[in-house]
Image: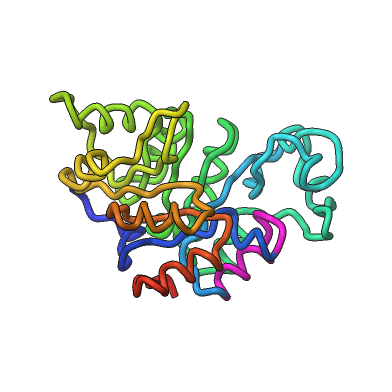
Amino acid sequence: MAHYAFLDHARPLAFAHRGASEESEENTLAAFREAAHLGFRYIETDVQASLDGVPVIFHDDALERMTGERGRIGDLPWRILSRLRTRAGEPLLRLDEALDALPEIRFNIDAKSDASVTPIAEAVQRAGAVERICVASFDVHRTLRLRRLLGEKLCWSPSHRGVARLWLARWLPVRIPSFPVVQVPTHFHRIPIVTPRFVEAAHGRGIQVHVWTIDEPAEMERLLDMGIDGLMTDRPRLLRDVLRRRGEWTAG
């Protein structure tokens, strides 16, 4: 198994999902800075692309939930998007701005559209940040393109097919592609994914298991007891408290 600098940290890894979104609006620089202030060194985020190919940190295709404006983020150029504000008055954030503003943070990036792939790669290359990002997407082709553009040092998580193969490996002698980490929810359509045997199958192949998005303390404890390697949460203060009680707070 290759070495990935993104994963070079004492485990369990603690991820602030879209930043400290309890404290500030999700995916804003304020939320990212608050997560860093809490001691988090890993942030999960989302990247869309503007009409003119600027990588914008934003989860939804549509602008309305976060800004109150109509329209889709991919239909507007950055000169227009840069003037918009979230409902609490925060500006939209570019990926290059986040990478530059928080050089100590490792970003787990979900490429939310096909158009976002090249802008993500270009921003990461300009920042020299390949070793402090991990990429994931529900669309396997986006991840493959990012791997081709950013090279072998890029950490990545597979999409459904890779997860399914690892899940089946508990019972069947299926071939598992080589990947460094699998980032999954606990269940898929009510089918349990993260089980002791799944974690064992991953660890037996040198694959880390990161689970999203976990916001209840009992569930955090259950998964940590199972031996998972990372947790993503919308409640970073709570996750920090749980890890501190267990003597496992290693993020900050």
Visual colour scheme: rainbow
> In screen coordinates, is 249 left or right of 240?
left
> In screen coordinates, is 208 left or right of 56?
left
Q: Residue at x 42, y 59 (%)?
A: 132
User: Could you say where residue 103 lies in the image, as x and y percent from the top left?
Assistant: 51, 69
* SS majority, magenta: helix
- Residue 144 in the image: above or below residue 24: above
> In screen coordinates, is 157 left or right of 79?
left
> In screen coordinates, is 158 left or right of 176?
right
User: Could you say where residue 76 lies in the image, as x and y percent from the top left?
Assistant: 78, 37
Out of 44 and 194, give the one closest to the viewer. 194
Q: Residue at x 62, y 46 (%)?
A: 55
- Residue 10 in the image: above or below residue 109: below
Out of 37 and 56, give the one closest to the viewer. 37
Q: Residue at x 48, y 32 (%)?
A: 138
Q: Residue at x 40, y 45 (%)?
A: 150
Task: Name, please, the residue furthest toward the left.
Answer: 173
- Residue 237 in the image: above or below residue 204: below
Q: Is residue 158 magenta?
A: no
User: Could you say where residue 35 lies in the image, as x and y percent from the top left?
Assistant: 57, 67
Work out which quarter of the rendered image holds the C terminus and state it.
bottom left
Task: Name, please, the residue furthest toward the front.
Answer: 218
Q: Quadrant of residue 192?
A: top left
Q: Quadrant of residue 37?
A: bottom right
Out of 229 and 149, give the one closest to the viewer. 229
Residue stretch in magenta:
24-37
Count of marks placed on residues: 0
User: Could you say where residue 222 lies in the image, as x and y percent from the top left?
Assistant: 37, 53
Q: Quadrant of residue 182?
A: top left
